[in-house]
Amino acid sequence: MSEQKVVHETETLRIPLQTNVFDKYIASDAIFKSDREMLRPSYIPKVLPHREKEIDQLAAIVSTGLRGDRPSNVLIFGKTGTGKTATVKFIANEASRVSTASTSIDFIYVNCCEVDTNYSVLQHMANKFITNPEERAPYNGWSIERVLSLFKDMVDKQKRLLIVVLDELDRLVYKTGDDLLYSLSRVNDDLSNSKVSIVGIANDLKFTDFLDARVKSRLGEERIVFSPYDAMELTDILRLRADLVFVPGALNDDVIPLCAAIAAQEHGDARRALELLRVAAESAERDGRRSVETGDVMRAKNKIELDTVTETVKTLPSQSKMLLLSMIIYSEKRRIMTTGDIYATYHNLCNSIGAQPLTQRRIGDLISELDMLGIVRARVRSFGRGGRTKEIELAVPLNETRELLVDDELLSSYKNARARFQTTLI
DNA sequence: AGTCCACAGGAAGGGCAGGCGA
DNA sequence: TCGCCTGCCCTTCCTGTGGACT
């Protein structure tokens, strides 16, 4: 009987001719006509619209190097996605095009978000010139002076002009102080054959307040400020990029203005605008449609926001995850909480799952870190005799974040302890 | 004007990990 | 193996703070 049924089902199943699950995605070229990598921030276009003035300023400074002199050190300021890095990389490309054997400039690019200690920045820079693995500076174990000395030796051997680009420099200064900048600003004193200039890129204009006066004057010989793009400028940037990447007619007329408007509201971030456009187009492509609509942009906006939260929360250290879970638990009682409220809840949570709690001092720092990451909004407030504390509010979707945390291996025991814990909370 | 509260946040230092050279 | 290096996470101790209360 069962055998007959199997035969019957097999006969009624209409097996498609398609031979591979990827076929329909690979075959589809209704939207993208070329490499979608052109919509990523890492792509440096041949033209940078609305940055002509800044390009000209930087070119004038760098051109000194092409005449054999050391260019001035430069500090570049501007918010995320205002084209700072793209402009510097664009200038580096242009400089290499016009370089000759006698007048060439080497650029070393260091992202101080990825390479975020004084030691690792120097190690990264020194190793750029070393091909033999045995001669390279190790990831740690050497004194900073030794790595600096290796860097100077290697640079001097090159007998050329070097421009060190330190991207996200403000983060490095906030984290480790200005010792590295002090050393780098004096590096030319010890070089006889080569010259070094520094280009610092920062989001925060105020970071120079944290610099020693000598470092500040040496480093900030020239300053360039990148203002945020407005919606019209973002529209131009997107149109230019869209012409390269999309099939004509693949974008609804309102798509680019909408992406530009959303990004303009968020401090004129061109990266954000490009990401919105790319994610919206990929969403339409996955649905098998031939055009991108405004609905795709709104879906892309929500997806990017949720993805960002998910990625940030997933990569938090375990104690920060417990702290965040404590905030979520407490916020079921009250939306706005204080450091004291959260610490009491966190302490109970630790006890209920058998974890060792940190001190309140440390938790204060972790709350500040969550604030920096945009997971919570915190502000210091005084309640008079009620004391001075931080008022904290969650800035992430509650339910989604709770699910992420409870699914975490480290907090899985919370599921079992939850009932027990909630009675102690009351 | 002085007191009080509930922290904020700086400074110093301990402990540990990972790596190197002697 | 030992001493030294850096980086990281954390604690302890301390002073500072703003506004309500006395």
Image (cartoon, coloured by chain):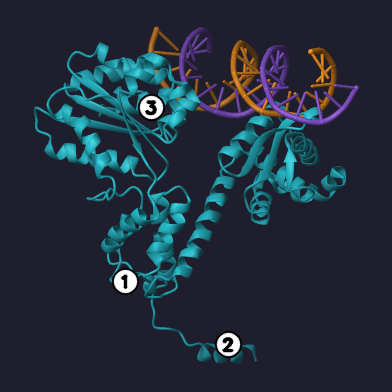
Chain colours: A cyan, B orange, C purple
Of all chains, the one bearing label 1 is A
Task: Please give the chain letter of the residue carrying mark 2.
Answer: A
Quarter of the rendering occupied by the C terminus of chain A: top right
Q: Amino acid at mark 3?
A: Val
- Mark 2 and mark 3 residues within 8 Å of each other at the beta carbon: no
Amino acid on which disc 2 is placed:
Val
The residue wearing badge 2 is: A6
Looking at the image, which residue is at 64% across and 88% down? A2
B12 relative position to A136: left or right:
right
Q: Earlier in the sequence, mark 2 or mark 3?
A: 2
Mark 2 on the same chain as mark 3: yes
Q: Residue A283 location in percent, x, y?
A: 44, 67
Q: Label 3: chain?
A: A
Q: Report the residue marked by disc 3.
A: A121
Q: Assign a secondary structure to mark 3.
A: helix
Residue linked to disc 1: A29
- Residue A287's quadrant in the figure? bottom left
Res A359 visible: no
